[in-house]
Amino acid sequence: MRLNTLHKVLVGVAVFSLLGFILLKNRKKSSSPLKVLFLGGLDTRKNDKDISVQSKLLQEGLGDKYSIKAYRYTNGKELISDITKNSKVIVVMFSAGCSQSFAVAKAMKNNNQKLSNVYIVEPYHSGGTTTKSVQKAVELGVPQKNVLVGTNSNTGLGVVSNTTQTPKCSPKHWCSLTKVGEIISK
């Protein structure tokens, strides 16, 4: 009789362990992709790429475990509104979209989100609005290494110190989107 009870306990433990393993495995499979909010660059000039092409370049670097919600560089307020509606996001701002760096960083901080999840990619650095916005975002706590810069001030060189240099890639400037995606997905 005693052996019979011991067998029942052992079988019960084995069944519960197996069920727990199956539930955990299925939970991992069904977890939704990480959300990236992307504020793009200019798309109005002859050689600019529209927001869908910019998003695809970013997605190439991110891979399929991330989903992207993209906004034109003029839609910073909509992106900020979406930060408040999500508990955990990664934000990428590119080129002209970097003019919203401080407002985005402030929204992330006010919503208890990590400023290490903010990436500022090749901002136009001329000492004007975008430069000041990037500098204030870094002062607020966005890591300097999360600011990717190209080879001249048009692509952010000199905007703040201790930045990450965009690796050589082609086509220049646009390929930085794929590169930041690779950095995020590591």
Image (spheres, rainbow, N blue to C red):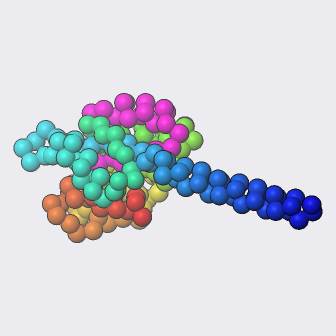
Front in this rendered view, residue 117 or 4: 4
Task: Determine whether 178 is above or below 33 in the image.
Answer: below
How many badges with numbers are in the image? 0
154 displayed left or right of 19: left
The x and y percentages for residue 91 are 40, 46
The x and y percentages for residue 90 are 43, 48
Residue 78 visible in the displayed image = yes
Q: Is residue 83 magenta?
A: yes
The residue lying furthest to the right in this view is: 2
* Residue name at image x 30 percent, y 40 percent: 70
In magenta, the rendered stretch is 74-94
* Residue name at image x 30 percent, y 37 percent: 71
Q: Quadrant of residue 100?
A: top left
32 displayed left or right of 61: right
Q: Is residue 16 magenta?
A: no
Residue 156 visible in the displayed image = no
The x and y percentages for residue 84 are 49, 33
2 displayed left or right of 157: right
* Residue name at image x 24 percent, y 49 percent: 56
Front in this rendered view, residue 163 or 80: 80
Q: Quadrant of residue 63?
A: bottom left
The residue lying furthest to the left in this view is: 46
The x and y percentages for residue 77 are 37, 30
